[in-house]
Amino acid sequence: MNSHMAITRGLELEWTTAQELYRFAQRLVQTPSVSAHEDAAAALVVEHLRALGFADVRVNAMGSVIATLGTGDGPTLLYDAHLDTVAPGTLDSWPHPPYDGVIADGALHGLGAVDMKSALASMIYGARQLLPWQDRLQGRLVLAFVVQEEPCEGLAIRYVIEEDGIRPDYVLLGEPTDLQISRGQRGRVMFKVAVTGRSSHGSQPQLGQNAIYAAARLIFAAQLLADSLPKDPFLGPGTIAVTAIHSQGSSLNAIPDLCKVYLDRRLTLGETVLGARAQLESLISREDIPATLQITTYDEPSYTGLVRTAQEAHPAWVLDRAHPLVEALQQTIQVVRGGAPTIGHWPFSTDGVYTMGQAGIPTVGFGPGDPDLAHTPREAVRLEDLRTAAHVYAGLAARLLLAE
Ligand SMILES: [Zn+2]
């Protein structure tokens, strides 16, 4: 047995520590943190990190929490989890109330249990296992718990890296993978097409130009386009979907002169934001649709009041299967769990659009929870998986930052 293997084995959480981890994840679920309202959750995380003995803990101008372990000048490994959740939606649809943090049948239930408060708590407890080793770390382990990831992935982690000056060599995202490895995702662009027409009285439609009819041609053309989008053998096909339509007219008996159509476009590997835009523009001109196209922007202030504007346009990314970060994570999981993990990709979008997609920092994913349960009222995660995740987070950091 090599020494990394021995160190990793020794980082397993004691039973009592695992109980503290579960209780903390439960408290996080019980603390509402819908995007741009993460203040209470951030305060809870800061207080808990300090109580556990983390000395370097701060909140940045945007409201994200950053904790650093080690001062060595070796590599910097960044663990990224988001503090925010989507809104709970209809409360009746939840089998357990979203903010009760019910623990039943060995699982934690509630909003954020899967996406992604369990990973956040497990990262803290994984790093906690390394506190006794922190003077021997050759590099640094940075925990970045960011805000506003759900509405605009990449926004807050970009701030941590570009404005707070943390320059990671490796990034691990704790988005749910059900304890398997993710090494990529498709990109995402949100287009808004404003189709214009000319108003007339509803009794004399021939005198106007109905913006809804023109929008219908666009929608039909987009549906046809969907079948011809390129496929990547690993990430799958690019997709396009109309997700909202809003028309506008002076009354219900007037011909509408404006119809806004929103299109969710997922980019597979090889597709670019510019290419997808040009494709849609040429479709609009081919169909002779009077319309202007734009990429939507996100500009909600953070809970601290900071406004960072970003276009909702994110590239696809994939980390090479043979990259040392993938290898290190795979070996760590194998030591912790015994079996080999599957290596796949996420169906949804993550902060990797910035860390790997834009900044080119090797990025990989590993987290507790079934990704198919994210953004559903059935969010629940097996408690034992939190303990396993914390152990893997500790082991990976030890493998990358401790000398053998
Ligand atoms: Zn998430």
Image (tube, grey):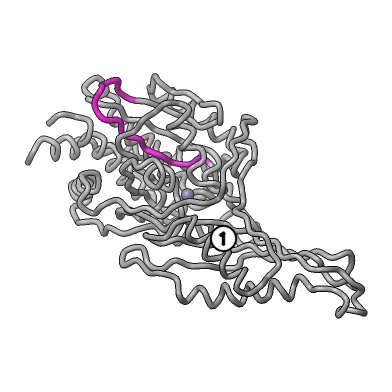
For this rendering, which residue is in front, 94 or 264?
264
For this rendering, which residue is in front, 53 or 303?
303
Q: Mark 1 points at which residue?
A: 95
For this rendering, which residue is in front, 71 or 308?
308
Vertically, is 5 above or below 285?
A: above
Instruction: Tell me the crowding category of disc 1: few under 14, some 14 to 19, or many 20 or more residues within 10 angstroms, Cα based.
Output: few
- For the point 39% across and 33% down, which residue is it? 143
For residue 214, say whether it is visible.
yes
- For the point 27% across and 43% down, which residue is it? 392
Indicate the amino acid at tag 1.
Answer: Pro
For residue 115, say whether it is visible.
no
Residue 79 is a magenta residue: yes
Residue 15 coordinates in the image, percent (x, y): 30, 39
Q: For the C terminus, give its image quadrant.
A: top left
Vertically, is 322 above or below 227?
A: above
In this picture, residue 101 sits left or right of residue 68: right
In this picture, residue 389 sits left or right of residue 291: left
User: Which quadrant of the figure has residue 339?
Assistant: bottom left
- For the point 53% across and 56% down, which residue is it? 189
> Which stretch appears magenta?
69-83
Residue 256 coordinates in the image, percent (x, y): 82, 69
- Numbered disc 1: secondary structure: loop
Figure label count: 1
Residue 1 is a magenta residue: no
In this picture, residue 315 sits left or right of residue 4: right
